[in-house]
Image (cartoon, helix red, strand yellow):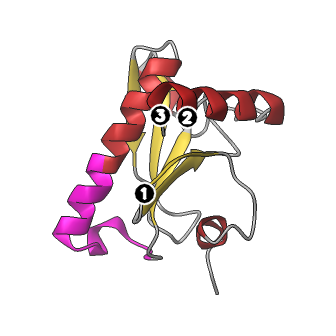
């Protein structure tokens, strides 16, 4: 059975897509810890990040770096934090989270409600400002 992320890749369910190339996709998390919390995934469905061949892992990290730079340009924050957990959805994914303190990366924190209008505007700005 396809993961929810594969369904997003195949455009079977909607997502706020920020950036994409032939092998990767970046989209806003629907249960964000902070505004701009983004998930970066490979388009191949694989459960565990360290099962990716080294070259594909390097390319995923490089793509994540591109997305983090886009986020940092649009969101006032000290840094874009990165974490990989991978327990809830069995599809490799990297969390990119705008942070000001280490506590901003605490997944037990209350999640924000993703406002569709704000998310659409954010995606529009990212694409306009990065010529994506």
Label 1 sits on a secondary structure element that is loop
Which mark, residue 21?
Answer: 1
Q: Farthest bottom residue?
A: 1
Cα distance in 3D space between marks 3 and 2:
5 Å
The percent position of residue 16, horizontal first and vertical second, equals 67, 46
Q: Which residue is mark 2?
A: 127
Q: Is residue 5 magenta?
A: no
* Residue 71 drawn at (x, y percent): 47, 28
Q: Position of residue 131 (x, y in %)?
A: 47, 34
Which residue is drawn at the image coordinates 64% and 87% (left, top)? 1
- Judged left or right of residue 80, residue 3 is right
Task: Write the residue at 50% across / 69% down.
Answer: 91
The image quarter containing residue 5 is: bottom right
**Residue 106, above or below 90:** above
Q: Main secondary structure of the magenta part?
A: helix
Q: Nearer the viewer, residue 22 or 42?
A: 22
Residue at 54% across, 41% down: 38
* Residue underneath mark 3: 131
Tell me: residue 28, above or below residue 6.
above
Q: What is the spatial separation of the Cα atoms under label 1 and label 2, in whole angstroms?
A: 13 Å
SS class, disc 2: helix
Q: Position of residue 81 (x, y in %)?
A: 39, 32
Question: Residue 130, located in which quarter of the rendered image?
Answer: top left
Q: Residues within 10 Å of mark 1 (few under 14, many from 20)?
A: few
Farthest residue toward the left?
Answer: 54
| Stretch in magenta | 46-62
Mark positioned earlier in the residue sequence (1 or 2): 1
Label 3 neighbour load within 10 Å: few <14, some 14-19, many 20+: few
Marks 3,2: beta carbons within 8 A: yes
């Amino acid at each position: 059975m396809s993961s929810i992320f594969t369904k997003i890749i195949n455009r079977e369910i909607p997502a706020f897509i920020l950036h994409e190339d032939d092998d990767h996709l970046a989209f806003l998390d629907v249960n964000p810890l902070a505004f701009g919390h983004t998930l970066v995934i490979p388009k191949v469905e694989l459960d565990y990040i360290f099962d990716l061949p080294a070259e594909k892992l390097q390319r995923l990290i490089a793509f994540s770096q591109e997305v983090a730079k886009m986020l940092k340009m649009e969101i006032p924050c000290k840094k874009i934090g990165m974490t990989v957990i991978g327990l809830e959805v069995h599809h490799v994914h990297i969390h990119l989270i705008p942070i000001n303190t280490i506590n901003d990366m605490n997944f037990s924190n209350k999640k924000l409600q993703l406002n569709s209008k704000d998310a659409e505007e954010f995606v529009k700005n990212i694409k306009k400002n990065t010529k994506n």
